[in-house]
Image (cartoon, grey):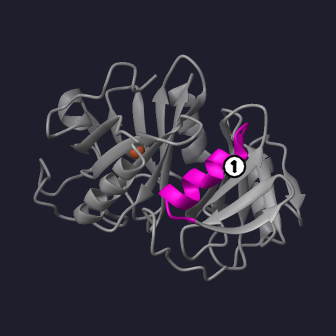
Amino acid sequence: MIKVNRIVYAAFETPDLEGQIDHYTKIMGLTLVERDGDAAYLSASADHHTVVLRKGSDARCNALGFQLPPGTDLGDYDKQIQAHGLATERRSDAQPNIKDALIFADSKGTKIETFVEAEAANVGFQAAGISPNKLGHVAYNCTDVQGDVKFYCDVLGFKVSDWMGDFFAFLRCGPDHHTINLVQGAKTKMHHIAFELRDWSHIRDACDWLAKDRIPLVWGPVRHGIGHNISTYHRNADGQIIELFCELDRVNEELEIYEPRRTHQEFPQKGKVWDDIQLAANMWGTPPPDGFLD
Ligand SMILES: [Fe+2]
């Protein structure tokens, strides 16, 4: 089975293209690499784009970009995806730096854009703004969490790292503890997009940077039990939640154990179902504000 190797970008529609570009450049410290009609491509550092913004009527995340392992034959991958009964589309012009992509929809309607090779932009890091290492994960509310977890595992090759009860799943496609989160909700929508920062002092500096623009945190800083990352959450110009995190668990894939951390509850720490929701959500105690998971 061909499995996706890593998440590369998230693509959004927005009624406020300039406001979102402002947030991702001036606040988040991404670089505006290219504007193509009503689309803007923004890079965190190594990839041509980490975030794509397109003018649209609604604020929503409509696509995710995943890189496949080097040497993958996209025709073989197409057959693998079609064997699941999914319609696919092969595109040579879907992205300015990706000449061959295979596109299909996931079980909740988000476009999955896969590719083997992409021209890098070699942008590097911005001196100003939060300037994250990379896109870490994207979390969704969904109406059929069990079905969507099955899709991500069976079709895309993800593995479940941890469950919070039976309603919140954390899935990985590489050594990072989670790349996709799926939480049962009343409707399907992106819940948050998360960027990896370098360390705890980088999170402090990021909070100070947000404070200069009077952008309040909506939750955090917290130490999640699941994943053991330190995180903060704020909103962008469209009101979508952006998480900034560091110290996320790393998984030894062969042994299915997490790299040892002082903050772990078990030694070795392994994937499990967390029944202690308070501990799973925030070891430091402060619960999420009302409605945070809606
Ligand atoms: Fe998250």
The image quarter containing residue 222 is top left
Location of mark 1 (residue): 18
Q: Nearer the viewer, residue 21 or 169?
A: 21
Q: Answer with left or right where residue 119 lies relative to residue 294.
A: right
Determine crowd level at label 1: few under 14, some 14-19, many 20+ residues with C-alpha closer than 10 A: some
Q: How many marks?
A: 1
Residue 8 x/y as whole percent: 60, 63
Q: Residue at image x 30%, y 64%?
A: 202
> Vertically, is 109 above or below 126?
above
Residue pictured at 48% horizontal, 56% vertical: 27
Does residue 248 appear in the picture of this structure? Answer: no
Indicate yes or no whether the magenta region holds residue 283. no
The answer to whether residue 57 is visible is yes
Location of residue 6 by image quarter: bottom right
SS label for mark 1: helix
Q: Residue furthest bottom?
A: 122
The spot of residue 197 in percent (x, y) is 36, 63
**Mark 1 within 8 Å of ligand 1, using the beta carbon:** no
Residue at image x 42%, y 37%? Answer: 169
> Front-most of 234 and 82?
234
Magenta-drawn segment: 13-30
**Quick one: 105 or 234, which is closer to the camera?**
234
Residue at left 14%, top 52%?
Answer: 264
